[in-house]
Image (cartoon, rainbow, N blue to C red):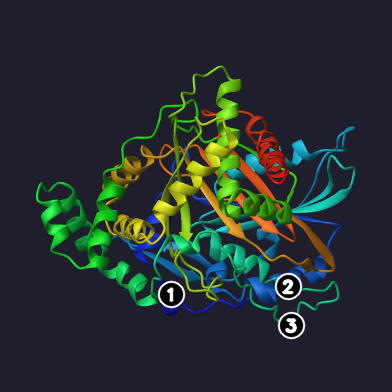
Amino acid sequence: MLSEAAPALHREKMSTVDTAWLRMDSDGNLMMIVAVLMFDKPMDMPRFRRAMETRFLKFSRFRSRVTQDMTGSAWWQPEEIDLDHHIVHRDLPAPGKRGNKKALERMVSELSGTPLDFSKPLWQMHVVDNCVGEDGKTRQAVIIRIHHCIADGMALVGVLLSMFDTTPEGTADAPADPFVLEEGNPWLDLMQPVTKATISAINVSTALWTKYIWMLADSNKLPGRIADMGGMAGRLTMDAVKLLAMPDDSRTRLKGTPHGTKHVAWSEPLPLDEIKAVGKALGGSVNDVLMASVAGAIGAYLRAKGDEVPHDTELRAMVPVNLRKAGNEQKLGNAFGLVPLVLPVGIEDPIARLDEVRHRMDELKGGYQALVAMAVLGVLGATPKQMQNEIQNYFARKATAVMSNVPGPQSPLYLAGSQLDQIMFWVPQSGDIGVGVSILSYNGGVQFGLVTDDAIATDPHEIIQRFAPEFEKLVLLALMSAW
Protein backbone atom coordinates (compact mmCIF):
# COMPACT_ATOMS: atom_id res chain seq x y z
CA MET A 1 0.00 0.00 0.00
CA LEU A 2 1.19 3.50 -0.80
CA SER A 3 -0.23 6.05 1.60
CA GLU A 4 0.18 9.63 0.42
CA ALA A 5 -3.42 10.72 0.86
CA ALA A 6 -4.17 14.32 1.70
CA PRO A 7 -6.98 15.26 4.08
CA ALA A 8 -10.43 15.82 2.63
CA LEU A 9 -10.00 19.55 3.18
CA HIS A 10 -7.41 19.57 0.41
CA ARG A 11 -9.70 18.27 -2.30
CA GLU A 12 -9.45 20.14 -5.60
CA LYS A 13 -12.35 21.30 -7.76
CA MET A 14 -12.34 19.95 -11.28
CA SER A 15 -12.25 22.47 -14.14
CA THR A 16 -15.25 22.80 -16.42
CA VAL A 17 -13.31 21.36 -19.37
CA ASP A 18 -12.27 18.28 -17.37
CA THR A 19 -15.83 17.97 -16.05
CA ALA A 20 -17.13 17.87 -19.62
CA TRP A 21 -15.00 14.80 -20.29
CA LEU A 22 -16.08 13.21 -17.00
CA ARG A 23 -19.72 13.48 -18.06
CA MET A 24 -19.26 12.26 -21.65
CA ASP A 25 -19.24 8.54 -20.80
CA SER A 26 -22.03 6.72 -22.64
CA ASP A 27 -23.07 3.16 -23.41
CA GLY A 28 -21.55 3.53 -26.87
CA ASN A 29 -18.30 5.28 -25.94
CA LEU A 30 -16.30 5.33 -22.72
CA MET A 31 -14.08 8.36 -22.23
CA MET A 32 -10.88 6.39 -21.69
CA ILE A 33 -7.49 6.90 -23.27
CA VAL A 34 -6.00 3.47 -23.95
CA ALA A 35 -2.32 2.82 -24.60
CA VAL A 36 -0.29 -0.31 -25.31
CA LEU A 37 3.43 -0.40 -24.53
CA MET A 38 5.50 -3.29 -25.90
CA PHE A 39 8.81 -4.19 -24.19
CA ASP A 40 11.62 -6.31 -25.58
CA LYS A 41 11.67 -8.49 -22.42
CA PRO A 42 9.83 -8.75 -19.09
CA MET A 43 10.45 -5.82 -16.77
CA ASP A 44 11.91 -6.11 -13.29
CA MET A 45 8.56 -5.82 -11.49
CA PRO A 46 9.88 -4.46 -8.15
CA ARG A 47 11.68 -1.72 -10.14
CA PHE A 48 8.52 -1.10 -12.16
CA ARG A 49 6.41 -0.65 -9.03
CA ARG A 50 9.05 1.66 -7.60
CA ALA A 51 8.94 3.76 -10.79
CA MET A 52 5.17 3.92 -10.45
CA GLU A 53 5.47 5.21 -6.89
CA THR A 54 8.18 7.81 -7.56
CA ARG A 55 7.27 9.01 -11.06
CA PHE A 56 3.64 8.22 -11.85
CA LEU A 57 1.98 8.68 -8.48
CA LYS A 58 3.73 11.98 -7.86
CA PHE A 59 0.81 13.44 -9.85
CA SER A 60 -2.03 13.87 -7.37
CA ARG A 61 -4.75 13.05 -9.89
CA PHE A 62 -3.52 9.45 -10.01
CA ARG A 63 -3.96 9.38 -6.21
CA SER A 64 -7.44 10.91 -6.22
CA ARG A 65 -10.89 9.56 -6.92
CA VAL A 66 -13.64 11.67 -8.44
CA THR A 67 -16.57 12.85 -6.34
CA GLN A 68 -19.56 14.98 -7.29
CA ASP A 69 -21.78 17.17 -5.16
CA MET A 70 -25.48 18.04 -5.39
CA THR A 71 -24.80 20.97 -7.72
CA GLY A 72 -23.14 18.74 -10.31
CA SER A 73 -19.64 20.05 -9.59
CA ALA A 74 -16.84 17.47 -9.57
CA TRP A 75 -13.87 17.26 -7.22
CA TRP A 76 -10.54 15.45 -6.93
CA GLN A 77 -10.59 13.65 -3.57
CA PRO A 78 -7.13 12.34 -2.47
CA GLU A 79 -7.09 8.83 -1.04
CA GLU A 80 -4.82 5.92 -0.18
CA ILE A 81 -3.62 3.95 -3.20
CA ASP A 82 -3.56 0.16 -3.49
CA LEU A 83 -1.24 -0.64 -6.39
CA ASP A 84 -2.49 -4.24 -6.44
CA HIS A 85 -5.85 -2.92 -7.66
CA HIS A 86 -4.35 -0.65 -10.29
CA ILE A 87 -1.63 -3.01 -11.62
CA VAL A 88 -2.95 -6.38 -12.85
CA HIS A 89 -0.60 -9.15 -14.07
CA ARG A 90 -1.91 -11.38 -16.89
CA ASP A 91 -0.75 -13.98 -19.45
CA LEU A 92 -1.73 -14.55 -23.05
CA PRO A 93 -2.59 -18.04 -24.26
CA ALA A 94 0.09 -20.07 -26.01
CA PRO A 95 0.88 -18.61 -29.45
CA GLY A 96 0.05 -20.23 -32.77
CA LYS A 97 2.25 -20.32 -35.85
CA ARG A 98 1.91 -16.57 -36.37
CA GLY A 99 2.09 -15.59 -32.73
CA ASN A 100 -0.74 -14.36 -30.51
CA LYS A 101 -0.95 -10.69 -31.45
CA LYS A 102 -4.65 -11.08 -32.25
CA ALA A 103 -5.24 -12.42 -28.74
CA LEU A 104 -3.55 -9.30 -27.35
CA GLU A 105 -5.66 -7.09 -29.61
CA ARG A 106 -8.80 -8.87 -28.37
CA MET A 107 -7.73 -8.20 -24.77
CA VAL A 108 -7.17 -4.51 -25.56
CA SER A 109 -10.55 -4.40 -27.33
CA GLU A 110 -12.33 -5.90 -24.32
CA LEU A 111 -10.66 -3.51 -21.90
CA SER A 112 -11.50 -0.56 -24.17
CA GLY A 113 -15.19 -1.28 -23.62
CA THR A 114 -14.96 -2.03 -19.88
CA PRO A 115 -15.64 0.89 -17.50
CA LEU A 116 -13.13 1.91 -14.86
CA ASP A 117 -14.07 1.62 -11.17
CA PHE A 118 -15.32 5.06 -10.11
CA SER A 119 -14.81 4.22 -6.44
CA LYS A 120 -11.06 4.34 -7.12
CA PRO A 121 -8.74 6.72 -8.99
CA LEU A 122 -9.63 6.39 -12.66
CA TRP A 123 -6.69 4.46 -14.10
CA GLN A 124 -5.46 0.89 -14.41
CA MET A 125 -2.53 -0.98 -15.97
CA HIS A 126 -2.49 -4.61 -17.17
CA VAL A 127 0.98 -6.16 -17.46
CA VAL A 128 0.69 -8.97 -20.02
CA ASP A 129 3.34 -11.69 -20.42
CA ASN A 130 4.00 -14.09 -23.29
CA CYS A 131 3.12 -11.71 -26.16
CA VAL A 132 4.49 -13.30 -29.33
CA GLY A 133 4.43 -11.19 -32.47
CA GLU A 134 4.31 -12.28 -36.10
CA ASP A 135 8.11 -11.91 -36.12
CA GLY A 136 8.32 -14.69 -33.53
CA LYS A 137 9.75 -12.42 -30.83
CA THR A 138 8.33 -12.69 -27.31
CA ARG A 139 7.57 -9.37 -25.65
CA GLN A 140 5.82 -8.04 -22.57
CA ALA A 141 2.92 -5.63 -22.99
CA VAL A 142 1.46 -3.04 -20.66
CA ILE A 143 -2.14 -2.02 -21.42
CA ILE A 144 -2.93 1.33 -19.82
CA ARG A 145 -6.40 2.80 -19.31
CA ILE A 146 -6.85 6.35 -18.01
CA HIS A 147 -10.04 8.39 -17.92
CA HIS A 148 -9.99 11.48 -20.12
CA CYS A 149 -11.05 13.74 -17.24
CA ILE A 150 -7.56 13.27 -15.73
CA ALA A 151 -5.79 14.63 -18.78
CA ASP A 152 -5.75 14.67 -22.57
CA GLY A 153 -3.70 12.35 -24.74
CA MET A 154 -0.75 14.69 -25.20
CA ALA A 155 -0.34 15.21 -21.46
CA LEU A 156 -0.70 11.50 -20.71
CA VAL A 157 1.88 10.51 -23.31
CA GLY A 158 4.20 13.06 -21.70
CA VAL A 159 3.55 11.65 -18.22
CA LEU A 160 4.01 8.05 -19.35
CA LEU A 161 7.26 8.80 -21.14
CA SER A 162 8.55 10.68 -18.09
CA MET A 163 8.62 7.33 -16.30
CA PHE A 164 11.32 6.07 -18.66
CA ASP A 165 15.11 6.25 -18.63
CA THR A 166 17.49 6.70 -21.52
CA THR A 167 19.63 3.72 -20.42
CA PRO A 168 18.76 0.25 -19.09
CA GLU A 169 20.62 1.03 -15.87
CA GLY A 170 18.43 4.00 -14.90
CA THR A 171 17.22 3.97 -11.32
CA ALA A 172 13.56 4.45 -10.43
CA ASP A 173 14.57 6.46 -7.37
CA ALA A 174 15.81 9.32 -9.54
CA PRO A 175 13.41 11.48 -11.56
CA ALA A 176 13.52 10.93 -15.31
CA ASP A 177 14.24 13.73 -17.73
CA PRO A 178 11.03 15.56 -18.65
CA PHE A 179 9.43 14.64 -21.93
CA VAL A 180 9.56 17.48 -24.44
CA LEU A 181 7.74 17.59 -27.76
CA GLU A 182 9.91 16.77 -30.72
CA GLU A 183 10.65 19.66 -33.03
CA GLY A 184 8.43 19.59 -36.05
CA ASN A 185 5.25 18.64 -34.18
CA PRO A 186 2.88 18.30 -37.16
CA TRP A 187 0.00 20.22 -35.60
CA LEU A 188 1.71 23.20 -33.97
CA ASP A 189 1.58 25.30 -37.14
CA LEU A 190 -2.21 24.95 -37.39
CA MET A 191 -2.84 27.77 -34.93
CA GLN A 192 -1.54 30.99 -33.52
CA PRO A 193 0.19 30.75 -30.11
CA VAL A 194 -2.29 30.45 -27.26
CA THR A 195 -1.30 31.73 -23.84
CA LYS A 196 -1.99 30.08 -20.50
CA ALA A 197 -4.10 33.08 -19.54
CA THR A 198 -6.36 32.50 -22.55
CA ILE A 199 -6.86 28.85 -21.63
CA SER A 200 -7.57 29.76 -18.01
CA ALA A 201 -10.13 32.31 -19.14
CA ILE A 202 -11.99 29.60 -21.02
CA ASN A 203 -12.85 27.93 -17.73
CA VAL A 204 -14.54 31.05 -16.31
CA SER A 205 -16.13 32.67 -19.34
CA THR A 206 -17.10 29.94 -21.77
CA ALA A 207 -20.84 30.11 -21.17
CA LEU A 208 -21.13 33.78 -22.07
CA TRP A 209 -18.63 33.57 -24.94
CA THR A 210 -20.18 30.49 -26.53
CA LYS A 211 -23.68 32.00 -26.34
CA TYR A 212 -22.26 34.96 -28.23
CA ILE A 213 -20.84 32.66 -30.93
CA TRP A 214 -24.19 30.88 -31.36
CA MET A 215 -25.89 34.27 -31.63
CA LEU A 216 -23.46 35.27 -34.37
CA ALA A 217 -24.06 31.99 -36.20
CA ASP A 218 -27.77 32.80 -36.38
CA SER A 219 -27.31 36.43 -37.30
CA ASN A 220 -27.94 37.73 -40.82
CA LYS A 221 -25.71 40.66 -39.93
CA LEU A 222 -22.62 38.45 -39.52
CA PRO A 223 -20.55 39.84 -42.47
CA GLY A 224 -20.94 43.39 -41.25
CA ARG A 225 -20.07 42.48 -37.68
CA ILE A 226 -16.90 40.68 -38.74
CA ALA A 227 -15.86 43.64 -40.87
CA ASP A 228 -16.03 45.85 -37.79
CA MET A 229 -13.70 43.62 -35.82
CA GLY A 230 -9.92 43.57 -35.67
CA GLY A 231 -7.90 40.95 -37.56
CA MET A 232 -7.59 38.35 -34.79
CA ALA A 233 -11.08 38.86 -33.43
CA GLY A 234 -12.54 38.64 -36.93
CA ARG A 235 -10.68 35.43 -37.72
CA LEU A 236 -11.66 33.97 -34.34
CA THR A 237 -15.32 34.76 -34.92
CA MET A 238 -15.24 33.49 -38.50
CA ASP A 239 -13.60 30.22 -37.37
CA ALA A 240 -16.25 29.87 -34.65
CA VAL A 241 -19.03 30.21 -37.20
CA LYS A 242 -17.30 27.78 -39.58
CA LEU A 243 -17.07 25.22 -36.80
CA LEU A 244 -20.71 25.64 -35.81
CA ALA A 245 -21.99 25.71 -39.39
CA MET A 246 -20.18 22.59 -40.65
CA PRO A 247 -22.45 20.33 -42.71
CA ASP A 248 -23.05 16.77 -41.53
CA ASP A 249 -20.36 14.34 -42.63
CA SER A 250 -20.71 11.96 -45.60
CA ARG A 251 -22.89 8.91 -44.93
CA THR A 252 -20.42 6.06 -45.42
CA ARG A 253 -20.52 2.65 -43.72
CA LEU A 254 -18.12 4.11 -41.13
CA LYS A 255 -20.81 6.47 -39.89
CA GLY A 256 -23.27 4.99 -37.41
CA THR A 257 -24.37 4.70 -33.80
CA PRO A 258 -21.78 2.88 -31.64
CA HIS A 259 -22.93 0.07 -29.35
CA GLY A 260 -19.94 -0.03 -26.99
CA THR A 261 -18.15 -3.21 -28.12
CA LYS A 262 -14.74 -2.21 -29.44
CA HIS A 263 -12.25 -3.74 -31.87
CA VAL A 264 -8.61 -2.65 -31.88
CA ALA A 265 -5.76 -3.21 -34.34
CA TRP A 266 -2.36 -1.70 -35.00
CA SER A 267 0.30 -1.84 -37.70
CA GLU A 268 3.99 -2.57 -37.63
CA PRO A 269 6.15 0.60 -37.65
CA LEU A 270 6.94 2.41 -40.90
CA PRO A 271 10.41 4.05 -41.12
CA LEU A 272 10.16 7.77 -40.29
CA ASP A 273 13.19 8.66 -42.44
CA GLU A 274 11.49 7.10 -45.45
CA ILE A 275 8.30 9.10 -44.79
CA LYS A 276 10.36 12.30 -44.56
CA ALA A 277 12.16 11.48 -47.83
CA VAL A 278 8.88 10.81 -49.65
CA GLY A 279 7.40 14.05 -48.38
CA LYS A 280 10.44 16.04 -49.51
CA ALA A 281 10.45 14.40 -52.95
CA LEU A 282 6.75 15.05 -53.52
CA GLY A 283 6.62 18.53 -52.00
CA GLY A 284 4.68 17.64 -48.85
CA SER A 285 5.29 17.41 -45.13
CA VAL A 286 5.47 14.24 -43.05
CA ASN A 287 1.97 15.01 -41.86
CA ASP A 288 0.70 15.44 -45.43
CA VAL A 289 2.08 12.01 -46.36
CA LEU A 290 0.53 10.36 -43.28
CA MET A 291 -2.89 11.95 -43.79
CA ALA A 292 -2.89 11.06 -47.49
CA SER A 293 -2.09 7.45 -46.59
CA VAL A 294 -4.93 7.35 -44.07
CA ALA A 295 -7.37 8.79 -46.64
CA GLY A 296 -6.20 6.29 -49.25
CA ALA A 297 -6.55 3.34 -46.88
CA ILE A 298 -10.11 4.30 -45.90
CA GLY A 299 -11.14 4.87 -49.51
CA ALA A 300 -9.66 1.52 -50.56
CA TYR A 301 -11.48 -0.21 -47.69
CA LEU A 302 -14.84 1.29 -48.70
CA ARG A 303 -14.34 0.25 -52.33
CA ALA A 304 -13.30 -3.28 -51.27
CA LYS A 305 -16.59 -3.55 -49.40
CA GLY A 306 -18.42 -2.83 -52.66
CA ASP A 307 -19.46 0.71 -51.75
CA GLU A 308 -19.71 3.48 -54.29
CA VAL A 309 -17.02 6.03 -53.50
CA PRO A 310 -17.39 9.01 -55.87
CA HIS A 311 -14.40 11.24 -56.50
CA ASP A 312 -15.78 13.93 -54.20
CA THR A 313 -16.42 11.61 -51.23
CA GLU A 314 -15.01 13.10 -48.04
CA LEU A 315 -14.62 11.96 -44.45
CA ARG A 316 -14.23 14.45 -41.63
CA ALA A 317 -11.90 13.61 -38.74
CA MET A 318 -11.70 15.71 -35.60
CA VAL A 319 -8.02 16.14 -34.75
CA PRO A 320 -7.04 17.04 -31.15
CA VAL A 321 -4.48 19.85 -31.16
CA ASN A 322 -2.28 20.55 -28.14
CA LEU A 323 -2.70 24.09 -26.76
CA ARG A 324 0.13 23.85 -24.23
CA LYS A 325 3.42 25.61 -24.62
CA ALA A 326 6.37 23.30 -25.34
CA GLY A 327 7.71 21.90 -22.08
CA ASN A 328 4.31 21.78 -20.35
CA GLU A 329 3.37 18.33 -21.65
CA GLN A 330 3.41 16.85 -18.14
CA LYS A 331 0.85 19.31 -16.81
CA LEU A 332 -2.30 17.28 -16.32
CA GLY A 333 -5.79 18.37 -17.28
CA ASN A 334 -7.28 18.96 -20.72
CA ALA A 335 -5.73 21.77 -22.73
CA PHE A 336 -6.48 20.98 -26.33
CA GLY A 337 -8.86 21.97 -29.06
CA LEU A 338 -10.23 20.14 -32.08
CA VAL A 339 -9.51 20.90 -35.72
CA PRO A 340 -11.83 19.40 -38.35
CA LEU A 341 -9.71 17.80 -41.09
CA VAL A 342 -11.65 16.68 -44.17
CA LEU A 343 -9.96 13.66 -45.77
CA PRO A 344 -10.44 13.26 -49.55
CA VAL A 345 -11.13 9.52 -49.42
CA GLY A 346 -12.71 9.55 -52.89
CA ILE A 347 -9.51 10.55 -54.71
CA GLU A 348 -7.79 7.35 -55.88
CA ASP A 349 -4.75 8.94 -57.51
CA PRO A 350 -2.07 9.09 -54.74
CA ILE A 351 -0.41 12.30 -55.99
CA ALA A 352 -3.71 14.13 -56.49
CA ARG A 353 -4.82 12.98 -53.02
CA LEU A 354 -1.55 14.19 -51.44
CA ASP A 355 -1.90 17.57 -53.17
CA GLU A 356 -5.47 17.93 -51.91
CA VAL A 357 -4.46 17.01 -48.34
CA ARG A 358 -1.64 19.58 -48.46
CA HIS A 359 -4.08 22.23 -49.71
CA ARG A 360 -6.53 21.51 -46.89
CA MET A 361 -3.80 21.54 -44.26
CA ASP A 362 -2.64 24.94 -45.54
CA GLU A 363 -6.18 26.28 -45.19
CA LEU A 364 -6.20 25.33 -41.50
CA LYS A 365 -2.92 27.06 -40.67
CA GLY A 366 -3.13 30.18 -38.56
CA GLY A 367 -6.74 29.55 -37.58
CA TYR A 368 -8.43 29.50 -34.20
CA GLN A 369 -10.79 26.56 -34.60
CA ALA A 370 -8.91 24.59 -31.93
CA LEU A 371 -9.40 27.42 -29.45
CA VAL A 372 -13.08 27.69 -30.34
CA ALA A 373 -13.55 23.95 -29.83
CA MET A 374 -11.89 24.13 -26.42
CA ALA A 375 -14.26 26.92 -25.44
CA VAL A 376 -17.17 24.70 -26.45
CA LEU A 377 -15.75 21.90 -24.26
CA GLY A 378 -15.57 24.37 -21.42
CA VAL A 379 -19.20 25.35 -21.73
CA LEU A 380 -20.22 21.69 -21.88
CA GLY A 381 -18.84 21.17 -18.39
CA ALA A 382 -20.84 24.13 -17.07
CA THR A 383 -24.21 23.17 -18.55
CA PRO A 384 -26.83 20.61 -17.47
CA LYS A 385 -25.97 17.12 -18.71
CA GLN A 386 -28.98 16.95 -21.04
CA MET A 387 -27.86 20.10 -22.83
CA GLN A 388 -24.29 18.78 -22.92
CA ASN A 389 -25.51 15.62 -24.66
CA GLU A 390 -27.41 17.65 -27.26
CA ILE A 391 -24.40 19.82 -28.08
CA GLN A 392 -22.09 16.80 -28.08
CA ASN A 393 -24.33 14.90 -30.49
CA TYR A 394 -24.55 17.96 -32.72
CA PHE A 395 -20.77 17.90 -33.22
CA ALA A 396 -20.68 14.10 -33.50
CA ARG A 397 -22.91 14.33 -36.58
CA LYS A 398 -20.25 16.49 -38.22
CA ALA A 399 -17.48 13.88 -38.09
CA THR A 400 -16.86 10.18 -38.68
CA ALA A 401 -13.59 9.73 -36.79
CA VAL A 402 -11.29 11.14 -34.15
CA MET A 403 -7.65 11.12 -35.24
CA SER A 404 -4.59 11.79 -33.06
CA ASN A 405 -1.03 12.31 -34.20
CA VAL A 406 1.66 12.54 -31.50
CA PRO A 407 5.41 12.92 -32.12
CA GLY A 408 7.36 10.86 -29.61
CA PRO A 409 11.10 10.68 -28.81
CA GLN A 410 13.35 9.36 -31.55
CA SER A 411 15.82 7.49 -29.32
CA PRO A 412 15.16 4.27 -27.37
CA LEU A 413 13.65 4.44 -23.88
CA TYR A 414 13.91 1.96 -20.99
CA LEU A 415 11.73 1.11 -18.00
CA ALA A 416 12.75 -1.22 -15.19
CA GLY A 417 15.62 -2.60 -17.28
CA SER A 418 13.58 -3.33 -20.44
CA GLN A 419 13.58 -1.42 -23.73
CA LEU A 420 10.37 0.03 -25.08
CA ASP A 421 9.93 -1.50 -28.55
CA GLN A 422 6.59 -0.04 -29.60
CA ILE A 423 3.93 2.30 -28.25
CA MET A 424 0.34 2.72 -29.44
CA PHE A 425 -2.56 4.69 -28.02
CA TRP A 426 -6.18 5.54 -28.75
CA VAL A 427 -8.19 8.55 -27.66
CA PRO A 428 -11.92 8.04 -27.04
CA GLN A 429 -14.66 8.88 -29.49
CA SER A 430 -17.70 10.76 -28.26
CA GLY A 431 -21.35 10.86 -29.22
CA ASP A 432 -22.06 8.84 -32.35
CA ILE A 433 -18.46 8.72 -33.55
CA GLY A 434 -17.30 5.11 -33.76
CA VAL A 435 -13.84 5.26 -35.38
CA GLY A 436 -10.54 6.32 -33.82
CA VAL A 437 -7.25 6.61 -35.69
CA SER A 438 -3.93 7.13 -33.91
CA ILE A 439 -0.49 7.87 -35.29
CA LEU A 440 2.55 7.92 -33.03
CA SER A 441 6.24 8.17 -33.91
CA TYR A 442 8.94 6.67 -31.70
CA ASN A 443 12.58 5.67 -32.17
CA GLY A 444 12.62 6.09 -35.96
CA GLY A 445 9.27 4.42 -36.62
CA VAL A 446 5.68 5.52 -37.14
CA GLN A 447 2.76 3.30 -36.14
CA PHE A 448 -0.90 3.45 -37.06
CA GLY A 449 -3.56 2.28 -34.62
CA LEU A 450 -7.27 1.91 -35.19
CA VAL A 451 -10.27 1.33 -32.94
CA THR A 452 -13.76 0.71 -34.31
CA ASP A 453 -17.09 0.01 -32.71
CA ASP A 454 -18.90 -3.26 -33.35
CA ALA A 455 -21.75 -1.36 -34.99
CA ILE A 456 -19.33 0.26 -37.47
CA ALA A 457 -16.72 -2.35 -38.41
CA THR A 458 -15.88 -5.63 -36.71
CA ASP A 459 -12.40 -6.11 -38.19
CA PRO A 460 -10.24 -2.95 -38.17
CA HIS A 461 -7.40 -5.05 -39.65
CA GLU A 462 -9.11 -4.66 -43.02
CA ILE A 463 -8.39 -0.92 -42.79
CA ILE A 464 -5.04 -1.06 -40.97
CA GLN A 465 -3.53 -3.46 -43.51
CA ARG A 466 -4.12 -0.88 -46.26
CA PHE A 467 -2.08 1.95 -44.66
CA ALA A 468 1.33 0.57 -45.64
CA PRO A 469 0.35 -0.20 -49.28
CA GLU A 470 -0.99 3.33 -49.71
CA PHE A 471 2.29 4.69 -48.39
CA GLU A 472 4.24 2.35 -50.70
CA LYS A 473 2.41 3.86 -53.67
CA LEU A 474 3.82 7.26 -52.68
CA VAL A 475 7.28 5.72 -52.24
CA LEU A 476 7.15 4.32 -55.78
CA LEU A 477 5.96 7.62 -57.23
CA ALA A 478 8.69 9.49 -55.35
CA LEU A 479 11.31 7.17 -56.81
CA MET A 480 9.87 7.60 -60.30
CA SER A 481 9.91 11.39 -59.95
CA ALA A 482 13.64 11.25 -59.24
CA TRP A 483 14.42 9.51 -62.56
- Quarter of the picture containing the C terminus is top right
Q: Quadrant of residue 336?
A: bottom left
Which amino acid lies under the numbered mark 3 shown in the image of this protein? Ala
Tell me which residue sits at (56%, 17%) in the image: 306
Q: Is residue 98 above or below residue 16?
A: above
- Quarter of the picture containing the N terminus is bottom right
- Determine if residue 419 is in view: yes
Q: Considering only order in the chain, which callout, 3 or 2, is on the residue closer to the N terminus?
A: 2
Circle 1 — which element? Answer: loop
Task: Report the front residue among 374 and 31.
Answer: 374
Q: Considering only order in the chain, which callout, 1 or 3, is on the residue closer to the N terminus?
A: 1
Circle 2 — which element? Answer: helix
Residue farthest toward the bottom in the current orientation of the protein: 174
- Where residue 197 appears, as percent x and y from the top left, is 35, 77
The residues tagged by marks 1 and 2 sit, at their Cα atoms, a distance apart of: 25 Å
- Where residue 135 appears, as percent x and y from the top left, is 87, 42
- Where residue 120 appears, as percent x and y from the top left, is 55, 60
Q: Which residue is mark 3?
A: 174
Q: Which residue is mark 1?
A: 11
Q: Is residue 260 left or right of residue 422?
A: left
Q: Is residue 222 above or below residue 317?
A: below
Task: Report the front residue among 79 and 18.
Answer: 18
Tell me which residue sits at (70%, 35%) in the image: 469
